[in-house]
């Protein structure tokens, strides 16, 4: 198989994370994801990006509190290759503290543990980027 054929068949897989409640960091990870998507699409190459939020960073995916709610929802409508994963451990603790189940944005999926999700993705060959 030639290098050109291999490059065309390869799917780039990137996992990023947000672990603090800082709108600047949240916007940075969204900008990074958008820029990476744009770069590979311009080259005619496929890319999958997963953004994992845990700890205080889970605020990014909270329906009532996300400072980047419009952007995250827009990503869900405009990028079928960019996904959002919410840490179930953090969600459970925050919901208990709030005394109610915290609603997440519609395009966020729950994973058992954000940190474990990062580890598993890296073990599966995904590139890890910490914005």
Image: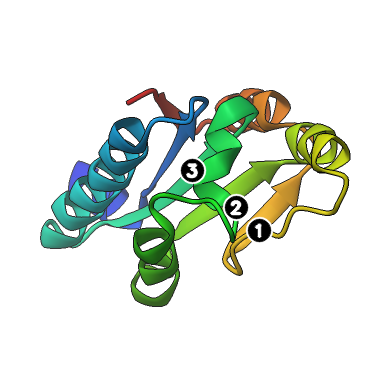
Q: How many marks?
A: 3
The CA distance from mark 1 to mark 2 is 4 Å
* Nearest the eye: 37 or 29: 29
Q: Is residue 6 visible?
A: yes
* Location of residue 119 with respect to 45 vertically, above or below: above
Residue 111 place in picture, x, y as percent: 75, 44
Which numbered dot is residue 62? 2
Q: Quadrant of residue 59?
A: top right
Residue marked by disc 1: 104
Among numbered discs 3 and 2, the one appearing first in the sequence: 3
* Nearest the eye: 57 or 35: 57
Residue 68 place in picture, x, y as percent: 38, 53
Residue marked by disc 3: 51
Q: Residues within 10 Å of mark 2 (few under 14, many from 20)?
A: many
Horizontal side of 126 relative to 111 (left or right) equals left
Which numbered dot is residue 61? none
* Nearest the eye: 127 or 101: 101
Q: Quadrant of residue 69?
A: bottom left
Q: Quadrant of residue 131?
A: top left
Q: Residues within 10 Å of mark 3 (few under 14, many from 20)?
A: many
- Looking at the rendered image, the disc whose residue lies closer to the viewer, 3 or 2, is 2
Residue in the image at 66% along x and 24% along y: 115
- Kindly indicate whether the residue at mark 2 contacts the one at mark 3 (C-beta within 8 angstroms): no
Residue 96 place in picture, x, y as percent: 88, 38
């Amino acid at each position: 198989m030639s290098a050109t054929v291999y490059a065309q068949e390869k799917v780039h897989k990137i996992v990023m994370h947000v672990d603090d409640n800082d709108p600047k960091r949240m916007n940075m990870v969204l900008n990074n994801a958008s820029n990476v998507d744009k770069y590979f699409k311009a080259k005619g190459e496929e890319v999958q990006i997963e953004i994992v939020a845990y700890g205080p960073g889970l605020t990014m995916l909270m329906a009532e509190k996300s400072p980047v709610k419009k952007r995250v929802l827009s990503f869900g409508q405009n990028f079928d290759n960019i996904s959002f994963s919410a840490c179930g451990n953090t969600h459970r603790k925050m919901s208990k503290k709030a005394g109610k189940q915290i609603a997440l944005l519609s395009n966020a999926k729950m994973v058992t543990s954000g940190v474990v999700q990062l580890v598993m993705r890296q073990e599966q060959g995904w590139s890890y980027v910490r914005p």
